[in-house]
């Protein structure tokens, strides 16, 4: 799994070509586990503040973590979609909803901290989260499909165990 992760990191800026599932899923798994560990560490630090929870700080770190995960997965998702003979633009489906959450979440938390209810903001963020989860689920379903056998417009069939950065 370490080799797949190193290969994925080496190809972070390479959006062309194809990616086999055997190379994609271990890399994506490690990126998500590292993100969850980082978020957990931030939550633990923020919970220890004597002044109470710092919602602005929490939102900032969650936003940074989301941007880093998207940056680390963008090229790999694009190559995986290319293996399905799809455009990499399908990978953008969840991003508008994620951006709305990153912007709206701090505002909602500040209202909760002040014990002020804004039902429209809550309803809007709830609906946005449903759409985010739906588009993320659709993207994961696409990424889970088998690749197109044989070469396609994005290149030859990816080698399952070729872990060179240029492959």
Image (tube, helix red, strand yellow):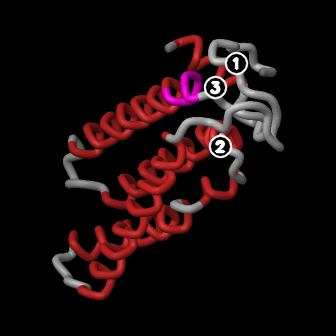
- According to the picture, the residue beneath numbered tag 2 turns out to be 84
Which residue is drawn at the image coordinates 36% and 67% (left, top)? 129
**Is residue 158 shown in magenta?**
no
Is 106 rendered above or below residue 62? below
Q: Position of residue 97 (x, y in %)?
A: 48, 67
At mark 3, the secondary structure is helix
Q: CA distance from mark 1 to mark 2?
A: 15 Å
Q: CA distance from mark 3 to mark 1?
A: 14 Å
The C terminus, quarter of image: top right
**Left or right of residue 84, residue 55 in this image:** left
Is 41 rendered above or below residue 116? above
- According to the picture, the residue beneath numbered tag 3 turns out to be 8
Q: Which residues are magenta?
A: 21-25
Within 10 angstroms of label 2, few (less than 14), some, or many (20 or more) residues? many
**Left or right of residue 25, residue 10 in this image:** right
- According to the picture, the residue beneath numbered tag 1 turns out to be 159
The quarter holding residue 150 reads top right
């Amino acid at each position: 799994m370490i080799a797949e992760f190193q290969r994925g990191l080496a190809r972070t800026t390479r959006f062309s070509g194809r990616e086999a599932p055997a190379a994609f899923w271990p890399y994506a798994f490690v990126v998500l586990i590292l993100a969850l560990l980082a978020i957990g560490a931030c939550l633990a630090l923020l919970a220890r503040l004597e002044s109470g929870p710092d919602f602005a700080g929490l939102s900032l770190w969650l936003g940074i973590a989301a941007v880093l995960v998207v940056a680390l997965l963008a090229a790999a998702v694009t190559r995986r979609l290319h293996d399905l003979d799809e455009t990499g633009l399908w990978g953008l489906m969840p991003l508008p909803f994620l951006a709305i959450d990153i912007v709206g979440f701090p505002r909602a938390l500040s209202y909760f901290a002040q014990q002020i209810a804004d039902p429209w903001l809550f309803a809007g963020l709830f609906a946005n989260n449903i759409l985010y989860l739906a588009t993320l689920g659709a993207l994961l379903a696409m990424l889970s499909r088998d690749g197109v056998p044989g070469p396609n417009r994005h290149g030859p069939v990816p080698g399952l165990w070729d872990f060179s950065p240029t492959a």
